[in-house]
Amino acid sequence: MTEGWLKTNTPGVRTRITKDGLPQYLATWRDHAGRQRSATFGTKKEAIAVREGARAKVRRITGGEERAPLLEAKTFDELAEHWLKIKAGQKKSIKDDRSIINRHLRPVLGPLALPQIRKDVLDEVYVELVGEFDEDGEEIRAGKVGAKTAWNILTLLGSMLREAKKQDWIPDVPHIERPPQDQQDFVWIDEAQVARLIEAAAEDEEHPQLSLIVATAAYSGLRAGEVLGLQWSDIDFEARRIGVRRSFGAEDGKDSSTKSRKVRYVPLLGKLQIVLQAWRADCPSETWLFPSRTGEARNPSDRHLQEFLHGALERAEIDESSVRGGRSNNGFRVVQRRPFTFHDLRHTFASNWMLAGEDLFKLSKVLGHKSITTTERYAHLAPEAFDGIRAMGGARDGATVGEAAPELVEENRRLREEVERLRSETARQQKMIDRLLAS
């Protein structure tokens, strides 16, 4: 705000010459809530008078002599409409935001004026979502959603309240409690199960591309929309890499950018290279890897990724009892493993990558995570990676893990230390941010 303004001999008052050659004065001060305020005037005397009057008013309010003026009483419903409007063209996850707001936030907070949404209200929202536990971890009151979903809901709520503060609709952002995130909030299958699943998918004669789609997801870590958005020009067999340039939304099937809106490159591992080279000769499209019957791009809502995958899972004898991983409830007790979904092929790739002793930070880049903390969920798998495991036919150019076990032990130790350091630093920074937002 003060760029181009020159200091005067009066604190809080600056000056400049306008294009018309006239002097102009800028007065700045902080109101009773600590927010920066400013105004411009034609004379220095007027700027000083208004600034001193505003500062005197702050002293009266903070001293209890005068009641603070009420903020504009916007409701949460109005904030929700504002949020969906300004974020519509900015976020790929805006449909998720709309669903969370309408299903979980508006029913509880909708009619409330924003200044009423204080810590006591937010604590009740937390308990409604996550549940209530005693000091021994026994459930007193069941939550409506799992810890991961609750985390997403509360994170969105925090972002919305920060936007409200930015608009001066609330004086500060109250602290929002979030549930602890367990490191095993996903399920996955090992490489032997992946091979069985691909074989079982190949038995589906009505949908011959199913096994190819499954193999691509399991051996590349791409999201469903990214797999279906692949074109042959994205596959570089010579350099052994895949360019991820587009993704199809599950609802509208439209071609759009990836989740991060950036192009990223992932390695073309040995097993997948063999599959795709064989498919290149038989593929009916010169453009799309996995075209529809008409030769166009496949709709991501196609049942190939849903119920037909379930049929392949049944033929491969993969169910809740045979998948690995699992989910904990608020960090206290392990609940039943859930059914395996197409997105779990992404978790499968990441888990088998770590089992093979590969680098956590490279994995973060391959998966397209913005933060290494998202990738940390797979770090606990690294200690298991020591007895002759081969990384999907090419993660270490064909070398078995057993041949490099001493090196992997040291590498694994270093990775664990770095992960712990990053986790501690992230927690420290989050506490600082929460304190700043609450101040």
Image (tube, helix red, strand yellow):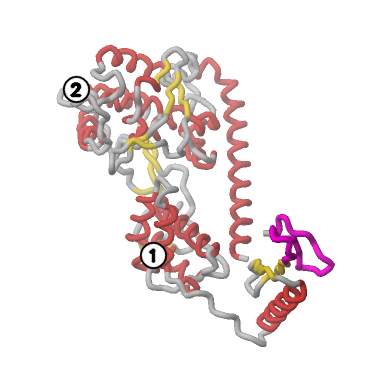
Quadrant the N terminus occupies:
bottom right
Which sits in the foreground, 428 or 403?
428
Furthest residue to the left? 206
Q: Residues within 10 Å of mark 1 (few under 14, many from 20)?
A: some
Residue 79 in percent (x, y) is at 43, 65
Looking at the picture, which amino acid does disc 2 mark? Answer: Glu
Checking the image for residue 292, the label placed there is: none
For the point 72% across and 66% down, which residue is it? 24
Splitting the image into 4 quarters, where does residue 207 fall? top left
Circle 2 SS class: loop
Furthest residue to the bottom? 65
Q: CA distance from mark 1 to mark 2?
A: 46 Å
Which sits in the foreground, 386 or 31?
31
Residue 169 in percent (x, y) is at 51, 69
Boundaries of the magenta span: 2-24
- Residue wearing tag 1: 128
For the point 30% across and 41% down, which residue is it? 250
Instruction: Pick whichever of labels 1 and 2 is earlier in the sequence.
Output: 1
Quadrant the C terminus occupies:
bottom right
Looking at the picture, which amino acid does disc 1 mark? Answer: Glu
Q: Is residue 58 magenta?
A: no
Residue 249 in percent (x, y) is at 33, 40
Q: Is residue 17 magenta?
A: yes
Task: Please tell me whether the stretch drawn in magenta is mainly helix, strand or loop.
Answer: loop
Which sits in the foreground, 157 or 93?
93
For the point 37% across and 28% down, which residue is it? 190
- Residue wearing tag 2: 203
Which sits in the foreground, 22 or 46?
22
Q: Is residue 406 left or right of residue 112?
A: right
Splitting the image into 4 quarters, where does residue 416 fall? top right
Residue 107 in percent (x, y) is at 34, 67
